[in-house]
Structures are given as structure tokens and as C-alpha cells.
Image: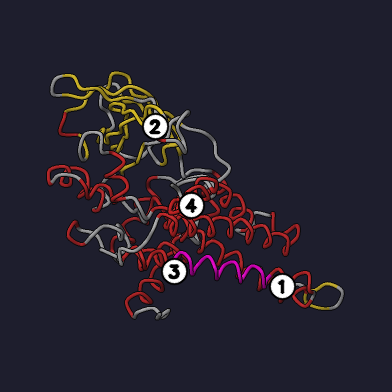
């Protein structure tokens, strides 16, 4: 197995890291202090990202994106992950791959403007009573002549405040299963400004300052039949086909933040003196660094292996669940140890460590909690033995 990067991959890594350090780092303090990322700032950075080809890098070339394979995309995501989340997600946007599943007319209306940086999308699945159990969603879409009528609420919907449209997953029926009734789910495009569709401010969040969440309310919101994405009752199928690697994206950004925290820790351990010598010479600190490096290496290998297998069509749900689980829990460990090494200074805003520590907490929750990842892994292990 060849672990070296190709010339193109190394160029993408170097270009992305330079962009993050030069264009994103300088604005982190302001976003962290205010919790606001101004649209003028977004547009300024966005234009630079488009100019050097970093924008919409996840979208296939045939649809106007950079067309990165999954492995290279994860290397790119790792570098972006070093910065404040709002800055890298909003200003160096990655439109939802699920937009590629649309009809030619839908791609022209929704995908192409996103790739050009003219609009943003958001995905709306989660409800107050349906987080990990998406089949338990209550928001509905019902046919009415040639239209669909949507009712219900979604919450925790990322960056919906700036999105020009939402990709909304709604209950469109039920089916009987051995465990009772299960919701049948269908996906729809809903444009901001559609009567009966309202976007409200979400919750104040300890993680990812400047990266907003919103509550979406649907009150007899009527949309035309052509706004359905994919087939009726096949919303999960279209999501699984186009959003399967999002768990790996979460893990990859965790690698970047861990790298940044670790670099600060090594430098501090070498420079900070106590009792007449660098604190890195004390076993209590040096062993922390060794454990951090080991956990980081293991997580990176799992993320990149899963990305490689994804490109080769051999990845399993357990592969991606293991990688996401390991990377997110690794970041929590590394962030905490980095602060311990720095002592009181680690909690000060002068360093990015307290931000990385705060931001790490959400990674074990969204895109599937750690408990859900363990369920996926154990289910795949036990299924061959079930009678």
C-alpha cells in the first residue's frame, strides 16, 4: 500500500493550508469574539477561494466543481478544518453533493448558482423529536393536486439563515415493519420566501461561533411537484447515495484541528521552563505528547483508509462509523491534553486551544452521535451470526 501523496494531492494540501493561514486565521478572533461572520467578509474571502479553485471542490467536474476524489477531498477538508468552522464552511463553501441528484432543470436552478458562489443551500432533516431516529420525524408533505403541502418544524439546521433554499426531508407516508410503522421519507427543494415557510433564529451554541443554526417552520407551505428531489418515498436512498461520506468529512476536519492544537503543545513543551528545564523533559508532559501523536496517527489512517475504500467502492458503513468515531473522540482527547499542557494559558483567548476544545464537543454529536456509530459498528459485526 502506497501512503505517499501524489504531486497533485500535495499541491492541493499546500494551497489549501496557505489559504487557511493567510485568509482565514486573521479573521478568527473577530468571529470568535462577536459570534458573527459578516456577509461582506464572506464575499471577500469567497471571491479569493473561487479565484484559486478551492470553492465547491467536492462537486464533480461535469457539474462545474473541482471534482476531487474522496481521498483528496478529505486531505483538503483536513486543511480547512484548522480554521474557525464558520470561516471555512461559509467562505470556502462545499455545496451539498445531493444537489447533483437533481434533474437537469433542478441542477440548473439550484446546483449551478451554488457552485458559482451566488447562493447557498442547507439540509433540513433533524426535528426536536427526531435526531438520531430520523424515521421518527413528524413533519409531513402531502399531495394536493399537482402540489405538495408541507407542515411541521425542523431545528438545528446549519446556516439556514443565509441559505437561499433548503433541501427538506419530510414524512410522506408509512410502512409496516416487524418493529412497527416506519416513516417513508421524501426530499424537496423549498425556496426561501415561499409562503408558509419561515426561517427563525436557532439556539446559541458553545461550539463553532459564527456558524449559525436555525429553526424552519412549515405552515401549509405549498410547493410544485417539480420541487421533489429524487423519487417519492426515496429520500433516504438519495441521501445515502450522495451524502455517504459526510461522516468522513467531519472526521477530516477534526484531524486539522488536532494538528493545530498539537503543534502549539509541542512548541510550548519545548519553550516553557519550570524547575530549571523545559516542561517537555518531564515525563508527565512528554508522555502526553506521545499519546496525542499516537491517537492522531491512528485517526488519520482510519479516515484516509475509509476515503480510499470509498473511491474503490469497497467501503462499509462500519468503516465510516469507525473513522468518524475515532477522529471525533481523538480530537476531544487532544484538545483537552493540549490545554492541560498549557495550564491556565490554554484557556485564554490569545490561543486557539479553548476554541478547539469547545468546538470538539459537537463533533461527537452531529452527523451521528458516538453511540450511533458504535451501534453501526456492532450491528455489522453481529449480523453475519444472526439466525
Q: Which mark is residue 382?
A: 4
Q: Looking at this view, is 92 or 236 the one in front?
A: 236
User: Which residues make up the magenta segment?
Assistant: 289-303
Q: Report helix, strand or loop for mark 2.
A: loop
Residue at numbered disc 2? 178
Tell us which disc is closer to us: 1 or 4: 4
Residue at numbered disc 1? 269
Between marks 3 and 2, how big is the CA–CA gap? Answer: 50 Å
Are the residues at dot 1 and dot 4 in contact (C-beta closer than 8 Å)?
A: no
Tell us which disc is closer to us: 3 or 2: 2
Residue at numbered disc 3? 17
At horizontal 40% and vertical 71% (from top left) the residue drawn is: 13
Name the N-terminal-most of marks 3 and 1.
3
Q: Report helix, strand or loop for mark 4.
A: helix
Q: Looking at this view, is 264 or 258 the one in front?
A: 258
At horizontal 45% and vertical 47% (from top left) the residue drawn is: 367
Amino acid at each position: 500500500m502506497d501512503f505517499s501523496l501524489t504531486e497533485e494531492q500535495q499541491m492541493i494540501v499546500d494551497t489549501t493550508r496557505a489559504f487557511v493561514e493567510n485568509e482565514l486565521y486573521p479573521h478568527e478572533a473577530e468571529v470568535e469574539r462577536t459570534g458573527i461572520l459578516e456577509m461582506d467578509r464572506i464575499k471577500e474571502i469567497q471571491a479569493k477561494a473561487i479565484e484559486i479553485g478551492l470553492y465547491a471542490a467536492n462537486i464533480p467536474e461535469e457539474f462545474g466543481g473541482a471534482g476531487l476524489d474522496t481521498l483528496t477531498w478529505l486531505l483538503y477538508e483536513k486543511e480547512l478544518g484548522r480554521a474557525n468552522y464558520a470561516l471555512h464552511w461559509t467562505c470556502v463553501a462545499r455545496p451539498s453533493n445531493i444537489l447533483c441528484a437533481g434533474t437537469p432543470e433542478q441542477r440548473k436552478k439550484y446546483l449551478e448558482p451554488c457552485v458559482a458562489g451566488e447562493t447557498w443551500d442547507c439540509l433540513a432533516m433533524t426535528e426536536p423529536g427526531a435526531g438520531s431516529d430520523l424515521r421518527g420525524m413528524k413533519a409531513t408533505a402531502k399531495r394536493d393536486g399537482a402540489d405538495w403541502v408541507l407542515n411541521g418544524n425542523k431545528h438545528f439546521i446549519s446556516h439556514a439563515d443565509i441559505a437561499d433554499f433548503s433541501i427538506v426531508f419530510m414524512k410522506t407516508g408509512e410502512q409496516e415493519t416487524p418493529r412497527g410503522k416506519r416513516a417513508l421519507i421524501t426530499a424537496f427543494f423549498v425556496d426561501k420566501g415561499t409562503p408558509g415557510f419561515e426561517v427563525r433564529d436557532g439556539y446559541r451554541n458553545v461550539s463553532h461561533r459564527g456558524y449559525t443554526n436555525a429553526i424552519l417552520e412549515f405552515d401549509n407551505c405549498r410547493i410544485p411537484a417539480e420541487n421533489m428531489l429524487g423519487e417519492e418515498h426515496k429520500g433516504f436512498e438519495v441521501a445515502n447515495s450522495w451524502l455517504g461520506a459526510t461522516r468522513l468529512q467531519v472526521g477530516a476536519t477534526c484531524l486539522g484541528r488536532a494538528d493545530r492544537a498539537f503543534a502549539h503543545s509541542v512548541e510550548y513543551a519545548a519553550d516553557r521552563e519550570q524547575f530549571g528545564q523545559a516542561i517537555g523533559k518531564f515525563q508527565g508532559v512528554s508522555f502526553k505528547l506521545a499519546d496525542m501523536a499516537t491517537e492522531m496517527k491512528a485517526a488519520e489512517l482510519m479516515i484516509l483508509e475509509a476515503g480510499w475504500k470509498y473511491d474503490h467502492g469497497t467501503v462499509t458503513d462500519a468503516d465510516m462509523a469507525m473513522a468518524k468515531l475515532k477522529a471525533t473522540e481523538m480530537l476531544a482527547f487532544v484538545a483537552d491534553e493540549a490545554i492541560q499542557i498549557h495550564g491556565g494559558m490554554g484557556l485564554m483567548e490569545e490561543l486557539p486551544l479553548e476554541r478547539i476544545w469547545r468546538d470538539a464537543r459537537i463533533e461527537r454529536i452531529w452527523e451521528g452521535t458516538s453511540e450511533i456509530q458504535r451501534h453501526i459498528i456492532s450491528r455489522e459485526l453481529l449480523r453475519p451470526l444472526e439466525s
